[in-house]
Amino acid sequence: MKGEMQMNIAEQIRQGRASIGIEFGSTRIKAVLIGEDYSVAASGAYDWENSCIDGVWTYSLDEIKAGLQGSFAALVQDVKSRYDVALTGAASVGISAMMHGYLAFDENDELLVPFRTWRNTMTEQAADAVTEAFGFNIPQRWSIAHLYQAILNGEEHVSRISFVTTLAGYVHWLLTGEKVIGIGDGSGMFPIDVTTGGYNSVMLDKFDTLTQGTAFSRKLSDTLPEIVPVGECAGKLTEQGAKLLDPTGAFAAGVPFCPPEGDAQTGMVATNSIAPRTGNVSAGTSIFAMAVLEKDLSAVYRQIDIVTTPCGDPVAMVHCNNCTTDLDCWVRLFADTLRVFGVEVPKSELYDKLYAEALSGAADCDGIISCNYHSGEHVTGFTQGRPFVMRSPSSKLNVANLMRSLVYSCMSTLKIGMDILINEEKIALDKIYAHGGLFKSPVTGQRFLASALGVPVALMESAGEGGAWGIALLASFLARKAEGESLSQYLEKRVFAGKTGSCMAPDEEDAAGFAEYIKGYKAALAVEKAAVEA
């Protein structure tokens, strides 16, 4: 049976009937290929890290191109090793990446300043000013905040700006020549009018008024990428793009591309949470929750973004810059300690055992508080981070309590933001779907998150695949949708039919322990503030 399946997939690949998704995450670029059963048939990855240069978190364009080629080459190799088939074409391709940020180009398509990623928290003045002008929350990491901050700073490059885009928009442009974007990724650049499916025209006019008399003389609408609706072709792989993607020349030009999307939107697709009353949490280097809204929020909250699904429906988003980075540092420390004693433990086994150990820790971590801020955190008002672990003299410091505290810390800031939606706005969530690196080791992250938020948390079998699989599904939707079929129908009836995953309800003891922990966490932010100031 397995042999027949492999032969079938091999034939789909050979005939160019499979779809490809490539997602640029914070620490890994992943490429996946899916067949006509929508499951991942092959994958490839490329590890990378952002750099902080002159106070700016960035990746160079050379790193972006190298990562694109590296992840695709790894995918090609995996296809060859699994199916003994050369990957020379596909039914469709999609590009996804970390949302927001600032990539500004001149009229000659030259990058004007190094890429400013979502991780930067240096646009407070601009974000506040635009939020006040729009009556709509503009977080610091949004593209429009970065642009306006550059204008306020009087930066030399502003007068030469011709085009501003996101990372996904940039890679898509490299491969297709099209300066376009999906509505979800676009909603992290500038507010969307959900009735028209385009940028909010009233706010566009307000921004143009704000910038009158400045060095930025263009209309903003002429500077942003064009929004292409989900399911429509957003360009085809050019000859130049094909050579960039696959320098060997084996992969042919002409493959259609779906609109480039943000990692928040691909996470929604990968968890089938694009309908009202559904939500998802993505947890890796950053952590964010998405709740699809049934109605508008009653007020503007600086801790909550309003973005959209890939279909353009409004979503409340709580985005936290810091999640697993500090936990990963501690795991590396444990690995290094073992190495000193001549013991080498595989990375996956180490994570699994330490996560399992966290389950036996005290529900409140016995007073051990971990603050995981490696960078600034807008939800709690920090522009810089100083990670630390603190405890009372009576706390029992053991691996179980420490690991539980480290995992709790990954979701504590998210809890602070989500409390606004759940307790103040009274939004209804039947279930939250979780995905991303925090949930690769089963049970622990899922159980703690359910207890932290007070909402059942489900994990699909595909939870570890995350956004790369999500953008591959959007690419597949472009290639295989029936006439008049919506994305929601496509996901519900085809991709996720009969798949329920595993679900955990909040545990009463864990919930009480987390409630006690979050009190200490909030109080410890005074220590974080003093550490940053000192």
Image: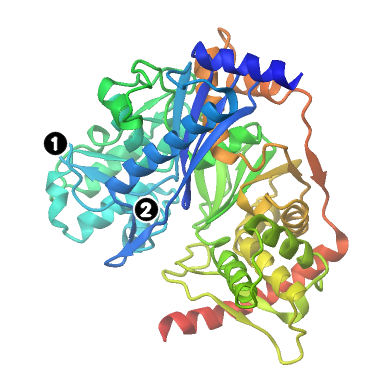
What secondary structure is marked by label 1?
loop
Query: Please, which residue is most extreme toward the top here?
Result: 483
Which color mode does the image show?
Answer: rainbow
Q: Which residue is mark 2?
A: 117
Residue at the image point whose x is 49% and y is 57% from the top: 302
Label 2, label 1: how far apart the Cα atoms are: 22 Å
Assess disc 1: are there few (<14), some (14-19) or many (≥20) residues with their C-alpha within 10 Å of its C-alpha. few
On screen, residue 419 versus residue 226, left or right, reads right
**Which of the image's four quarters has the N terminus?**
top right
At x 57%, y 12%, the residue is 11
Q: At numbered mark 2, what does the secondary structure look like: helix, strand or loop? A: loop
Local crowd size for mark 2, using a 10 Å CA cut-off: few (<14), some (14–19), many (≥20) = many
- Rendered image quadrant of residue 2: top right
* Nearer-the-camera pick, 302 or 123: 123
For residue 378, above or below residue 433: below
x 46%, y 70%: residue: 382
Q: Quadrant of the C terminus?
A: bottom left
Q: Which mark is residue 107?
A: 1
Tag 2: amino acid: Thr
Q: Is residue 151 left or right of residue 333?
A: left
Residue furthest out toward the bottom: 393
Tell me the residue at 12%/55% (across/down).
Answer: 156
Point out residue 293 in the picture as x, y percentages from the top left corner: 62, 38
- Between disc 2 and disc 1, whose residue precedes? 1
Can you give x and y, in whole percent of width and height, for residue 272 in the image? 66, 32
Q: Amino acid at mark 1?
A: Glu
From what the image shows, is residue 180 above or below residue 375? above
Q: Is residue 469 left or right of residue 248?
A: right
* Count of marks overlaid on the render: 2
Say above or below: 228 vs 368: above
